[in-house]
Amino acid sequence: MKKNRFDVKIDLEIRNLSCWRQEKPILENIGFELGQGKCLLLRGPNGSGKSTMLLCLSNILPYSGDISWLVGDKGGVGGDETEISHLVHFITAQTAMKPALSLAENLAFWAAMSGDDDSRVAGALEKSGLGGLDDFAAGHLSTGQKHRLSLARLLVSPRPIWLLDEPSSTLDAQGDQWVGELIDDHLKNNGMVIAATHRSIPLNRDSTVHTLDLGAS
């Protein structure tokens, strides 16, 4: 499977980010910076705002403060979805797959929706541990296999920014290792990863990984 190296410089700057849901503060005055080739793990108990942070970064939830994506020589483009939507994958715990379609058909559909062809589908299935199941209906997969198929979308449509919500949930120890390798490879190719997780992800010690504890008092 061909590698995808991202040569466009991308930096993220967050200043005083706050978000309220149903009149309750979920995030208050959060700030951090992250560059390409780096990973940020969002930690904290349930309700601490890990998923909310990803929704704000995806422009799905309203927020106050500044989210600035610095792309190439451009200035901050925070809050302008049209500027970054083509650079981002947001993968949640929801598989968002069509159960009647085969694995290959699901990934080909996702690639087409993202403006890419299906040339990476076979390689993505193989790398995801689903090789040989190309024509298998997605609805008959186990929970862990469905999650692997969902993450395989990252491989059929290369994007430099990955926003991952609980990427190793429902996976066994072998699956955890695969997620770690997936992220490591992306970072080596100048990608950026922000992942909300309550589980340890086995990442290479050479990878640049930061942690933001949203549960800290």
Image: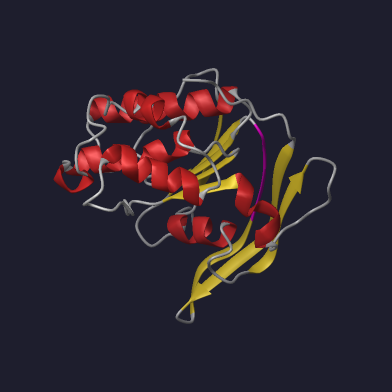
Residue at left offset 83%, top offset 47%: 74
Q: Which residues are magenta?
A: 31-36
Q: Is residue 166 visible?
A: yes
Q: Nearer the viewer, residue 207 or 213?
A: 207
Magenta-colored stretch includes residue 67: no
Magenta-colored stretch includes residue 34: yes
The quadrant holding residue 118 is top left
| Residue 190 higher or lower than 78, as above or below | above
Residue at left offset 31%, top offset 51%: 97
Q: Where residue 178 appears, x then y in whole percent?
A: 35, 26
Q: Where residue 194 appears, x then y in whole percent?
A: 53, 43
| Residue 75 higher or lower than 147, as above or below | below
Q: Where residue 181 appears, x then y in whole percent?
A: 42, 23
| Residue 8 higher or lower than 100, as above or below | above
Residue at left offset 32%, top offset 37%: 104
The quadrant holding residue 73 is top right
Image position of 56 (left or right of 182): right
Image position of 107 (left or right of 136): right
Judged by its main secondary structure, the magenta piece is: strand
